[in-house]
Image (cartoon, grey):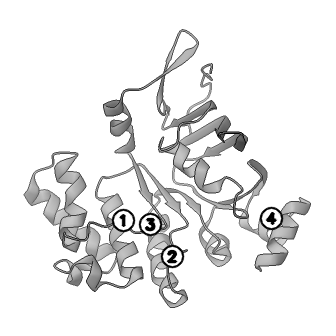
Amino acid sequence: MTAVPLTDAPPMVRARNVRKRFGHLEVLKGIDLDVAVGEVVVVLGPSGSGKSTFLRCINHLETIDGGSIHVDGELIGFRAQEGRVRHLRKREITRQRREIGMVFQQFNLFPHLTVLQNVLEAPTGVRREPRGPARERALELLAKVGLEEKSASYPRQLSGGQQQRVAIARALAMRPKLMLFDEPTSALDPELVGEVLATMKGLAEEGLTMVVVTHEIGFAREVADRVVFMDAGVVVESGSPASVLDDPSNPRTQAFLSRVL
């Protein structure tokens, strides 16, 4: 791999020619994508198109095989030296991940900890924040997602939508500059989807930079600044929600939307 130099003032995310394979299967085939500071980008596409893999590459949960990803101007997962790139050490990757929040399909809450303890775990354990101020902020975040009254409950006592909102509060507790959402409503019953999407909409209105992989077309239409359609490991189409969702130019986008709308 060779380092890809930055030229202009960096956006929050800059991906260039990102490639990823699992064995003989090439999942990402040269992804180019910029995400501006404060922008909400929704990534659509059929299953197996590489959406979730690309999201996991942004915070180096998956190691890319080619190209580069910068977040806020910093090369993710690697260090550039004399035109070559070398893998970062584990503690350096952990430092980078502190700035990138991620919410998964599954909630991944600690079942033996209360809601408040789940939100407190990372800022006190990873960032070493004093427990008093961290607790106060955790309660503020639980209030933001509408769950302050559930602070003493355990995950098993919550609905799926409530658990996902706790997961969002937990990610926000690390004060990320970027939030990644990997199909955050796909594991929820239909009646619980709205409460999670409403929480995400509130974050977007506050100006948080977000990249969201989802099949929720209504959310994309209402909240996204830009919609990206991926298929077979490439970006097929990108533009405003109106242009991509209402007047797609690529036949693959048209075929996908005709099935899901």
Please report whichever mark, 1 or 2, sits nearer to the chain's N-terminal start. 1
Please report whichever mark, 2 or 4, sits nearer to the chain's N-terminal start. 2
Quarter of the image with the N terminus in it: top right
Q: Residue at x 89, y 59 (%)?
A: 250
* 204 to the left or right of 54: left
Between disc 1 and disc 3, the foreground one is 1
Instruction: Tell me the quarter of the picture where residue 94 sits.
Output: top left
Amino acid of disc 3? Leu
Count residues near mark 3 (Cα–Cα under 10 Å), then give few for <14, some for 14-19, many for 20+: some
Amino acid of disc 1? Asn
Element under disc 4? helix
Q: Residue at x 44, y 66 (%)?
A: 203
Amino acid of disc 2? Ala
Please report whichever mark, 3 or 4, sits nearer to the chain's N-terminal start. 3
Rendered view: 99 above or below 103 = above
Please report whichever mark, 4 or 1, sits nearer to the chain's N-terminal start. 1
Report the residue marked by disc 4: 243
Rendered location of residue 71, percent (x, y): 50, 39
Report the residue marked by disc 3: 203
Quarter of the image with the C terminus in it: bottom right
Q: Residue at x 81, y 69 (%)?
A: 256
Rendered view: 37 above or below 150 = above
* 35 to the left or right of 252: left
Between disc 3 and disc 2, the foreground one is 2
